Amino acid sequence: MLQNYTLLLNANADTAQQGGGSLILSLLPMILIFGLMYLLMIRPQKREEKKLKEQINAMRVGDSIVTIGGVVGKIMNISDDEVTIATSVANTMMTFKKQAVSTIVQSEENKRIAEKERVEAGEPEKKSFFDRFQKDKNKNSPNK
């Protein structure tokens, strides 16, 4: 009788250990789905938000912007958290919060100023992966 009882306990212990493994296996697909969702949706969105925040901080008077409402204008004044733009031919002045800016188009003069400041600050040049191949192609070009 005692032997039957110990066999029964051992059998219950084996099934309990197997059940823990099946719990992990059943949660694995859900964990993979959340990981994939993070890589495909959340991470790129955070990257875009960071890039826009950097552009907003680098805005200068003279740049053109588009607001989240679709208003297009040229920056006339920048204060702490507000931007005043001139729109239309009549130069209608409108003031928006910086958070309302969705797109920034730098003027050529401001691009040169920003590049000059970047060089003076000693920041490294931002290069994409494909820029390496463009420079190599230009060096090997026979038209030089």
Image: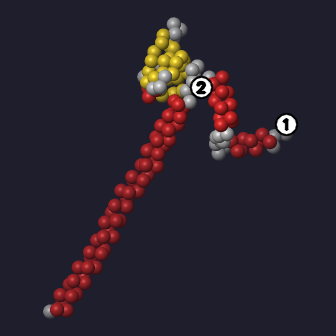
* Residue for point 85% across, 39% down: 142
Disc 2/disc 1 C-alpha distance (Å): 31 Å
Reply above or below: 13 against 20. below
Q: Is residue 8 visible?
A: yes
Residue 9's disc number: none
The amino acid on which the numbered mark 1 sits, given as a three-letter code, is: Lys
* Residue that label 2 marks: 106
Q: Is residue 73 visible?
A: no
- State how the image is colored: secondary structure
Residue 144's disc number: 1
The amino acid on which the numbered mark 2 sits, given as a three-letter code, is: Gln
Residue 18 location, quadrant: bottom left
Percent x, y of residue 83: 48, 21
Reply above or below: 134 against 66. below
Relative to 104, is 132 on the left or the right? right
* Mark 1 residue crowding within 10 angstroms, few (<14) / some (14–19) / many (20+): few
Quadrant location, the C terminus = top right
Percent x, y of residue 34: 39, 52
Q: Residue furthest top?
A: 90
Helix, strand or loop at mark 2: loop
Relative to 100, is 3 on the left or the right? left
Question: Which marked residue is nearer to the observer: mark 2 or mark 1?
Answer: 2
